[in-house]
Amino acid sequence: MVIPETFKAIRAEENSSGNIRPLLKEVSLDSLPAHEVLIRVEYSSLNYKDALSATGNRGVTRNYPHTPGIDACGTVVYSADQSFKKGDLVLVCGYDLGMNTPGGFGQYIQVPAAWVMPLPEGLGMRESMMLGTAGFTAALALYKMEMNGQRPGNGPVLVTGAGGGLGSLAINILSRTGYEVIAATGKTSAHEYFKSIGAAQVIDREQVNDHSGKLLLRQRWAGVIDTVGGNILSTAIRACQAHGNVAVCGNAASFELSVNVYPFILNGVNLLGIDSATCPMELRKQVWKKLADEWRPEALDQISLGISLEALPKHIHLLLEGKIRGRVYINLKD
């Protein structure tokens, strides 16, 4: 494999108006940080955090210009760490990739060896990025819920933000593993889509947006995978069955949470924080192994859209406008 002096990347740069926008650029290989493992990126994926980074959110990325992309899958070109060798197929998701370290929206990344894991057996590179951080987060949520006693026989599991990548994959993984799924979404016109990927019931998100002020609500689900935060999360907690698990995975609606203690001290509801970025490597490998095997979503092609690097800036803006359903993965090979 010939290592080029430059490579294609989507760079978030400030324009003459002071706005930061994603642009397709040629980037010098020498600009990559001096970490142990150089990887030729074959596929990446588009996440909400990437869209924020690409448009100048300094809560995600401090300094610009910058290459976003919190997910990357590809081939090792060089490794100063004996854990990896040239030609290994590897996966990097989370840590600081794409936040303040140049990420998977470039054809090459150079990262610490501690961030790199072998591509799970039985999972192709394209499939791994159909899953990406969204699929890993959904699976990590279910893993922690089941560690805490969640079982299909306990009752249905609510998924909020069901139309997003994380929500769609959560529905399909839960359905695959025998759970009855209630999908809460603002995209109720896509009712058939949610049914086709495994939702038993589709409800409007306003049904999970209670403003009554009640401290507890009628119990409606045995567990929750929440991707939106705010009052929807508060409602989901107050309507959760006794000893159920509520996994907190995102803040698409709000980073704030206002809830009283009664769901926890009277109903024994468990609030589980899901941090996919800094998940320990051994746990990370266990969850990815499940994703490659018994938890492998059956509707990946239906949930995912493949695009080129050139098309990525357009899809970044579509994601921020709420106009993308499911997952977007990027082919960087060409």
Image (tube, grey):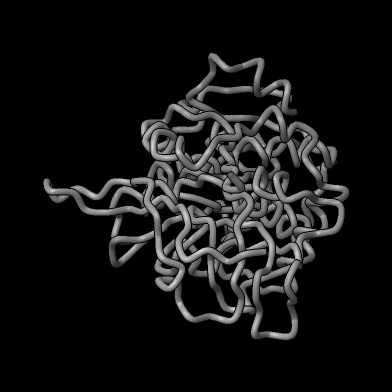
Give the x, y percent position of residue 51.
Answer: 40, 46
Q: Please tell me which residue lies in front, 89 or 287.
A: 89
Residue 301 drawn at (x, y percent): 71, 31
Q: Is residue 147 left or right of residue 182?
A: right
Q: Residue at x 57, y 56 (%)?
A: 71
What residue is at 52 percent from the left and 22 percent from the top?
204
Q: Image quadrant of residue 155?
A: top right
Where residue 306 appears, x then y in whole percent? 60, 34
Residue drawn at x 34%, y 62% is 61
| Residue 15 is at least partly visible in this image | yes
- Left or right: 83 with respect to 168? right
The residue located at (46%, 52%) in the rendering is 8
Check the image and report above or below for 186 versus 37. above
Quadrant in which the C terminus is drawn: top right
Front position in the image: 254 or 241: 254
Please indicate whether residue 54 sits to the left or right of residue 195 in the image. Answer: left
Foreground pick, 16 / 100: 16
Which quadrant of the view contains residue 282?
A: bottom right
Q: Is residue 172 above or below residue 74?
A: above
* Camera-nearest residue between 235 and 171: 171
Whether residue 223 sits left or right of residue 47 in the image: it is right
Residue 219 appears in the figure = no
The percent position of residue 224, horizontal first and vertical second, equals 63, 44
